[in-house]
Each structure stands twice: as C-alpha cells, then as structure tokens.
Amino acid sequence: MTLRKDTLETKKRILSVCVRLFLEQGYHNTTINQIITEAKVSASSFQNIFRTKDGVLYELIEFMFNGQFGAARNIIGLELPPVYTYAAETAIQLVLTELNENLRDIYLEVYSLPSTSEYIHQHTAVELHKIFGMYFPNYSESDFYEMEIGSAGIMRGYMAKKCDIHFSLEKKLSGFLTLSMRAYKVPEKEQQNVLAYIKNTDIRAIADNVMQKLFAALEMKFDFTLKK
C-alpha cells in the first residue's frame, strides 16, 4: 500500500522520536504517550501507521543488523576462514549489550518479538549456510534456518545475563562461541584457534567503535541528535 505524502512525513517524525528515545532511555522506558507527544502526532495516527510500539522495531532492525557481517569482515580481513567472521560478529553484538544498557534492552526485545526474531532467523540463516555449509554438505538454507532458531536462543540468553565479577566478558564470549561452534560442528582444533583469536583481539574497543558509528548512522538515517 502506497502511503500519502503527509502520512510518510508523520511516519518519519514518529521514527525519529522513537529511535532517539529507545537509544537514550531504553525501549521499555519509552511510552506511547511520550512518543506521540514528542512527535506531535495523534494516538490514532500512530496506531494507523505502526499499530503498536513493537511495530517501530521492525523498521529499526533491518538497519541495525544488515551491516553486521560486513563490519566483521572488515575487522578480520579476508585471509581468515569464515568462522572467524561469525565469531567476530557475534562477539561484537554481545559486547555492545555490555557497553550500553539501552542497546541491551533493544536487542533483547528484537530477539523476543515474533516479527523481528523471524527477520533475524531468515537473514542469519543465509550467512550461516555460507559459513558452516562445509560441515553440513547436505544442508540447505532451510536447515540452517532451523538451527538458527536454537543459536539465536543461546545468543539472547547470553545477552540477557549481565557480566559481573563472577561472569566476566571473556567467559561470556568463550561460553557462547564454544556452544555455537560445537553446534555447527567446527573441529575442536579450529574452535581453540578461533577462541584464541577473539581473546587476543580488543573486542571491547572494536565494539565501542562500532557502537559510535552505529549511533552516528542512526542519527543521520532517522534525522535526530542524541543527548551527549
């Protein structure tokens, strides 16, 4: 359905306010009343375009997830096997949620909602097929989609658990990657090499750089300025 020009402008204004508020104060702390007040729209206009607050996340998720594997490839280069790309991408994602609680809030909701988690499953399955297909020669993207449902559940579980003195970031990354690589039948020796690579890489600094670039890109795309 083609949206009228005034409806498109209203949608753009709502998205700008929503994304800014989600990043500044968290998804769950942002109310519909706050959104419609700051966007200067009526409740009926919001409901006609997005129906619920969850509807906004689908607009956001594509932008946030599309470039993740590309960013990981840029970090590790082309000389290492694809499993290193997977390790770097997932490690960065986990670290992002430790660096910023509002990002944790957004990611957890995205991994929980049916529509947004379905987006993740479908798009990640394509990448998983490319990365781990050598270990499952008879598997299709559909098979990897089914496996991704499980690995996404593991990812959400690790994201939800905050690091503390008993559960360090190193333990979190090692635990998630070990479970995932075993599920995808990565040889034990290769698993150890990948874990050593991640351990010896300043993933926190890389993730912080990715976060700053993400925020800048979101500000540009959705036309807002975050509070400093």
Image: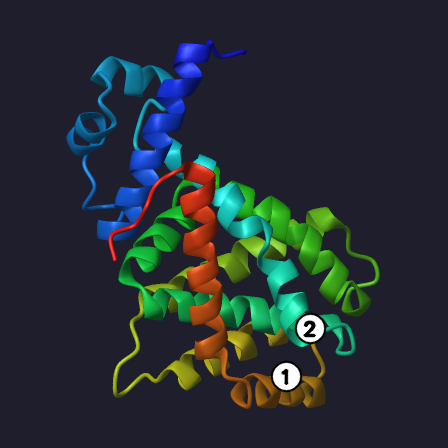
Q: Nearer the viewer, residue 71 or 179?
A: 71
Residue 140 position in % (x across, y down): 77, 51
Quadrant location of the N terminus? top right
Residue, far right: 137
Residue 194 is labelled as 1
Task: Give the residue pinned by disc 2.
Answer: 83
Above/below status of 195 relative to 184: below
Asked whether the beta carbons under mark 2 and mark 1 sit within 8 Å of each other, the answer is yes
Instruction: Label 2, secondary structure: give it.
Output: helix
* Residue 214 visible in the snapshot: yes
Could you say which quadrant of the image residue 104 lies in? bottom left
Residue 40 position in % (x across, y down): 22, 22
Spatial separation of the CA atoms under disc 2 and disc 1: 8 Å
Mark 2 surroundings within 10 Å by alpha-carbon count, few (fewer than 14), some (14 through 19), many (20 or more): some
Residue 191 position in % (x across, y down): 64, 84
Q: Nearer the viewer, residue 1 or 21?
A: 21
What residue is at 41 percent from the left and 54 percent from the top? Answer: 215
| Upstream in sequence: badge 2 or badge 1 | 2
Instruction: Label 1, secondary structure: give it.
Output: helix
What residue is at 40 percent from the left and 46 percent from the top? Answer: 219
